[in-house]
Amino acid sequence: DAGVIQSPRHEVTEMGQEVTLRCKPISGHDYLFWYRQTMMRGLELLIYFNNNVPIDDSGMPEDRFSAKMPNASFSTLKIQPSEPRDSAVYFCASRETGGSEKLFFGSGTQLSVL
Amino acid sequence: EDKVVQSPLSLVVHEGDTVTLNCSYEVTNFRSLLWYKQEKKAPTFLFMLTSSGIEKKSGRLSSILDKKELFSILNITATQTGDSAIYLCAVVLPPSGSGAGSYQLTFGKGTKLSVIP
């Protein structure tokens, strides 16, 4: 299995622009998580899905952030409009029901908002 | 308020040294604690601990959990430059809010380990 796949690896954009991050979980995994990592706050859970349904989005910082999972093999995290304080590494992770709580992470998207 | 606290935040050692990384937590309904290693990209899984006092070991790395005192340690013996990374501790929390949903991981801020030749 190729593991969790994220794209793009790097994204540089200007303040006010829309940013879309993409994730393909491991096949057969029915939980998908979006995390954000910064030096100040570490890894923070933004939102997670089970069977494509958003379960808990309490970590989403504000209405500028939205996430979707239209099918079992694809999810997006969108920021509109982006701001410099959104600059961070965004990770997607997945795991399977009934398995351990161990998460498998993608390589992340390094987002820089200028 | 942080539920998972790691110490030290950073550490510089020489090759061959032994290091101990600490993780303390404050959660109810504890299920398990996980350690991850993060080099330049994705965090990779090291250990999952659920039972107190039972050491998990993999090569030069080992970890143990103390559920009474609410902490875990990660030991690395005979460190090598390839051990340089951020080590993350995560605790499994029960579902938030009404209880719907799944258990999820809450991470500490990590310990940045630098091993110099």
Image: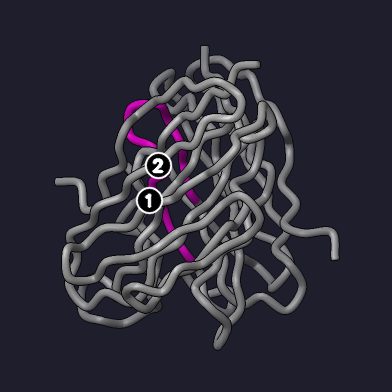
Looking at the rendering, in which quadrant would you find the C terminus of chain B? top right
A47 in magenta: yes
Residue B107: numbered disc? 1
Q: Nearer the viewer, residue A8 or A14?
A: A8
- Secondary structure mostly taken by the magenta-highlighted segment of the chain: strand
Instruction: Give x and y (percent) for residue A72.
Output: 69, 73
Which residue is rendered at x = 53% and y = 63% of the image? B47
Q: What residue type is labelled 1?
A: Phe
Whichever of labels 2 and 1 marks the residue nearer the N terminus, that label is 2
What chain letter is assigned to the residue under label 1? B
- Whether residue A93 sits left or right of residue B72 in the image: it is right
The magenta span reads A35-48
Q: Which of B66 and A61 is in front in this view?
A: B66
Quadrant in the picture for residue B45: bottom right
Q: What element carries label 1?
A: strand
Instruction: Give x and y (percent) for residue A24.
Output: 73, 58
Residue B20: numbered disc? 2
Q: Real-space Cα distance between discs 2 and 1?
A: 18 Å
Q: What residue type is labelled 2?
A: Thr
What chain letter is assigned to the residue under label 2? B
Q: In this view, does B110 lie above or below A82?
A: below
Residue B63: numbered disc? none
2 vs 1, front mark: 2
Which residue is rendered at x = 47% and y = 27% of the image? A82
